[in-house]
Amino acid sequence: MKQMKLIASFGLCVLSLVLAGCQTTASSSHQFAQPAVGWQTKTGQLSYTDQQTSLIGEVLVRYSKQGDFELTFTKAGGITLLALRQDATFGKAEGLLARRDWSGPLAEAPPRLRGWFQLRDKIVNGRRSATIRHDSGEQTFSLRF
């Protein structure tokens, strides 16, 4: 009986690894649009706070009329805190604030990244605004361009 439970547990572990590998392969095959002529570019400062962190750094934002979006949040010395890429349905986050790099459908984004992905709409729709503030759960974002 113990052997059957051990074999079943081992089988579940192997299945989990296989399924995780499949998602990674599918996610890595997504092609984001490359910045091109016609994309808007903004630079400024971003203040970010959550329950555990409070940071101020430089932000570079690029976006297209089709909804493609890139955001890079850095600290002095060129340390990338977070790099986002997204389009209408898919996103990718890398860097220290992502904790673990993530990519996948936006609807499946981890809670710690949802506020970051919501910034696209705030920035694109607030094009003429020099300041943007966004609250998402425990996260607060203040941008000044």
Image (tube, rainbow, N blue to C red):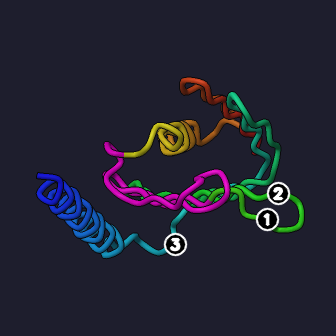
Side (left or right) of 42 relative to 125: right
- Which residue carries the number 2 mark? 75
Q: Amino acid at mark 1?
A: Ile
Occupied quadrant, residue 4: bottom left
Q: Please report contact status of discs 3 and 2: CB closer than 8 Å, yes or no.
A: no
Mark 1 Cα-neighbour bin, 10 Å: few <14, some 14–19, many ≥20: few
Up the image or down, 56 lies above or below 75; here it is above
**Mark with earlier residue (3, 2):** 3
Q: Amino acid at mark 2?
A: Lys
For the residue labelled by badge 3, is the local secondary structure a helix, a strand or a loop? Answer: loop
- Which residue carries the number 3 mark? 35
Q: CA distance from mark 3 to mark 2?
A: 23 Å
Up the image or down, 121 lies above or below 72; here it is above
Give percent across and percent down for residue 135. 60, 25
Q: CA distance from mark 3 to mark 1?
A: 22 Å
**Magenta stretch containing residue 105, yes or no?**
yes
Given residues 38 and 138, the one toward you in this image is: 138
Side (left or right) of 77 relative to 85: right
Q: Which span of residues is magenta-colored? A: 83-108
Give percent across and percent down for residue 45. 79, 46
Given residues 97 and 38, the one toward you in this image is: 97
Occupied quadrant, residue 6: bottom left
